[in-house]
Image (cartoon, rainbow, N blue to C red):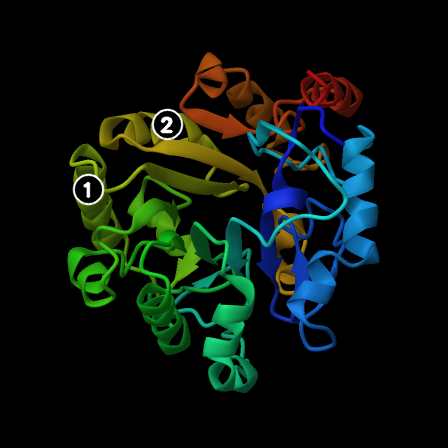
Amino acid sequence: MSENYAICTYPFESAQISMQGDVYVCCPPWCRSFSFGNIYEQSFDQIWNGEKAKEFRRQFINGNYNICDLNLCVKDCSHNVVPTETAPKPKTFIFCYDATCNVKCIFCRSCHQKQDLTYFNEHMDEIIYDMLENAQNVVLSGVGECLFSPHSRKLIKRISEIYPDIKFSLISNGILCDEKTLTELGIVNKLLSVTVSLHAVKKKTYDKLVIGGDFNRVVKNLRYLSQLKKDGKLTNFILNFVVNAYNYKEMIPYMNMAEEIGATVGFLELLKLETNEDVYQKLNIFNEKHPEYNNFVKILKNPVFHSGNCTINDCMLNLKPVSFLQSLKNKFKKI
């Protein structure tokens, strides 16, 4: 196929490894956990252009996005590409398998997860050479704290040594996202983006949501990251905010804080996980039966959530999913 399309590029340019070794192109809930394969069972080459990968790409090429949960998707990923069933190795690689963390967010996990990283430690260089030959950007981590984990810190250093031109995108809780840590890892001048998961503007709210965190330290580090962006050493500075019953009233002041420090905001819907079942019902402000649901809907009507500084999915803005599906199909069409 030689025609240019405006299409979601993730199936053609991005790969993500989960804790179980499964390879996805996007956050698993957003692509309905459609895995291309497992690195414990096949080589990456076999996975990336295997039959499951081709099947996934075919659907996108045909304008069929039913394989994705479009109510959750907030990605602005429409670019002009020449889509084909097979693809070169990914430009973006997301290492999302190391769950080692220094805090416990109550909507994420109730305890620290024990994980065997022996395979990755023993095969680190092999993994890097096998997967990253075309990579321009490496993302860490999404399921833990990459700046805390000894394994992820080692991975960052090895990638930087083997492929010195690769840029890094970090997803962090912000506690260790300071000059000292980034300098030790040698990536101050190799940052494409930093996303800080901060779910409150008030320390009292933060302490209810993040067990073992340090709100004041995070705020201090946000100022440091803001200066990096001003100095041109950081392209994208993003704040992620998982909306729930404890923090939804802080969404508007959160936007004001983000504007002050030069960050964009991603508001994310609370997901039900095996690790948060004990608090999900209490925190799930998206449930129409929740006692504070109507107040939540009123807040979402504020025009600030339609600004260019905010990413929020249409479902959260109380729009009908069918209208979002149609708008996406119109957006990702042949041009």
Q: Quadrant of residue 330?
A: top right
Task: Indicate left or right for 26 with 162 as reference.
Answer: right
- Give coordinates of residue 226: x percent, y percent: 22, 38
- Mark 1 element type: helix
Q: Is residue 333 shown to the viewer in this render?
A: yes
Look at the numbered disc 2 and give the secondary structure of its residue: helix
Question: In this rendering, is residue 288 above or below 139?
Answer: above
Q: Which residue type does callout 1 highlight?
A: Leu
Give the side of residue 83 with respect to residue 14, left or right: right
- Mark sitting earlier along the chain (2/1): 1
Q: CA distance from mark 2 to mark 1?
A: 20 Å
Disc number placed over residue 228 in the picture, else none? 1
Q: Residue at x 43, y 30 (%)?
A: 251
Tell me which amino acid carries mark 2: Met
- According to the picture, the residue beneath numbered tag 2 turns out to be 255
Instruction: Reply above or below: 280 against 120.
Output: above
- Front-most of 298 and 315? 315
Q: Residues within 10 Å of mark 1 (few under 14, many from 20)?
A: some
